[in-house]
Amino acid sequence: MRIQRKKAKPKSKKLFIIIPFLILLFSAGLFGIYFLNQSHSRQTTAPSDEKYYFADSKYSGIRSKFVTRDNKREKVSIEYPITENEKINRLISESIDKIDRDFQNTVLLATVFDKPMTETIGYQVTHNTSEALSIVVNIKQDMNGAHPASMTQFWTFDKKSGEVVGLADFTEQSDEAAEAIMSAAKDNISQTIKQRQQPEIDLNEIINKEALSNFIITNNGNSLAWPLGQASLLPSSYGELTITVPISSVSKYLQNPTARKLANIPKPPEPKPAPAPAPAAPTPAPTTGNKVIALTFDDGPGPYTAHLLDILDQYGAKATFFLIGSKVSGQASVVRSIQARGHQLGNHSWSHPELPKLSVDQIAGEIDRTNEAIRQATGVKPSILRPPYGAVNGVVLEQLRLRNMSSILWSVDTRDWADRNSQIVCSRAVAGARPGAVILMHDIHQTSVNAVPCILSSLKQQGYSFVTIQRLN
Ligand code: NI
């Protein structure tokens, strides 16, 4: 013990000297870093009068870095946003620096200086939630003699991942959704141009998915916008222009988790809860313990119906298609194919109204016109009707009874129109499966059709087979 203590003594003496020395070294280092930082602008190749400083911005969680250069040749002021996400900061600063480098090159190459060239770059935050951040960077440059330039760069970011959210993410790659947003954007531009009494212009050449890929969220999460600088999409003579599309006008196309997470997407009206079927029109009940399931597809025929028929054939599955009468004659061959391949055809009204809101004559017309269209295409008259939104009343049921038809509702709603996601649709269908279940889907959505192989293979493994409504009992 004693020996060890003795031996330890010189060590602690050494430490006594080393520790203060390290502290001193560390402080000197810190001071050095601080000092270097202060004089950073003098260390780089940037012009000697570049200065910068940091300040809080008016936006929560965002600071600004200001960079200025002021001399005979140029007057520059740049405000960079500094968010809590490094990836976001890097993308924005790289984009600003690229523009600034071009400006500096112009300044360097210029020979005559009546007055300094000016560049002002600032930013605005238009949407700032825990999930999403939308930022517009405004760039104004005035190089003597040339036209002053006004440009913008803008993005919506997923705040957590730091990734840019593009239009394709927001519409989940749905062509239909992208088309709807593009057409709303074109309408908005046309309106603005009209108000400003500017000449009409063919927007089909100009507005496409790429042009609209980056967007910002504005208006408290209720609008999508594209703040266009001068000459960025439209000819320079049209000036600056912001395209605005209210989300409510396209919300039907934005029912997906990404869009819901980042903006305010109003839900479309819920289909009414299925009313109890009247005795005259019973929904087939699972009377047997047979492991059979009826897949039903509403609102077609559509562009994916033919592909769906191939999938069903591959699995030896039969299904029931509730068609919208007004769509039948235009796609008679696919309707014939549904019938020819052993599936059942049902009536889903002519124009998809809420039947109880119509007069008796109108209800009769919705049913009869559709029956007639299907009969003309296939030679077969449907014996079942699925009321749009599941909405029926005594008047509707009486009209069905007079025609020897039944109202068919469902026991499993995949809500595939809301979540355009094949995996979600598949797991809902599989989770709801029971012997005798009637599963509701819509073959007008590609994501729904793409969910079918997953549904069929999962449920087949559980011993289910797939039959028409007619064969369910
Ligand atoms: Ni429907």
Image: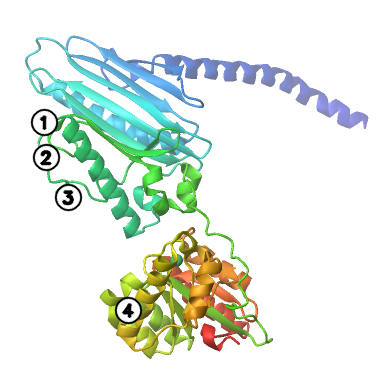
Q: Which amino acid does label 3 sit on?
A: Asn
Task: From the image, state whether disc 1 or disc 2 is nearer to you.
Answer: 2
Q: Is mark 4 on a helix, strand or loop?
A: helix
Q: Mark 2 points at which residue?
A: 200
Between disc 3 and disc 4, whose residue precedes?
A: 3
Q: Do the residues labelled 3 and 4 touch (CB within 8 Å)?
A: no
Q: What residue type is labelled 2?
A: Glu
Q: What residue type is labelled 1?
A: Ser
The CA span between labels 1 and 2 is 12 Å
Between disc 4 and disc 1, whose residue precedes?
A: 1
Residue 196 lies left or right of residue 298; in this view the side is left
Q: Which mark is residue 373?
A: 4
The CA span between labels 3 and 1 is 18 Å
Q: Nearer the viewer, residue 119 or 391?
A: 391
Quadrant of the frame with the N terminus: top right
Q: What element carries label 2?
A: loop
Q: Where is residue 255 in the image (x, y as percent from the top left)?
A: 46, 53
Task: From the image, state whether disc 4 or disc 1 is nearer to you.
Answer: 4
Task: From the image, state whether disc 3 or disc 4 is nearer to you.
Answer: 4
Residue 407 lies left or right of residue 381; in this view the side is right
Q: Name the residue under label 1.
A: 237
For residue 116, above or below residue 462: above
Task: From the image, state whether disc 3 or disc 2 is nearer to you.
Answer: 2
Q: Mark 3 points at which residue?
A: 204
Residue depicted at 10% across the width and 20% down the height: 110
For residue 103, above or below residue 433: above
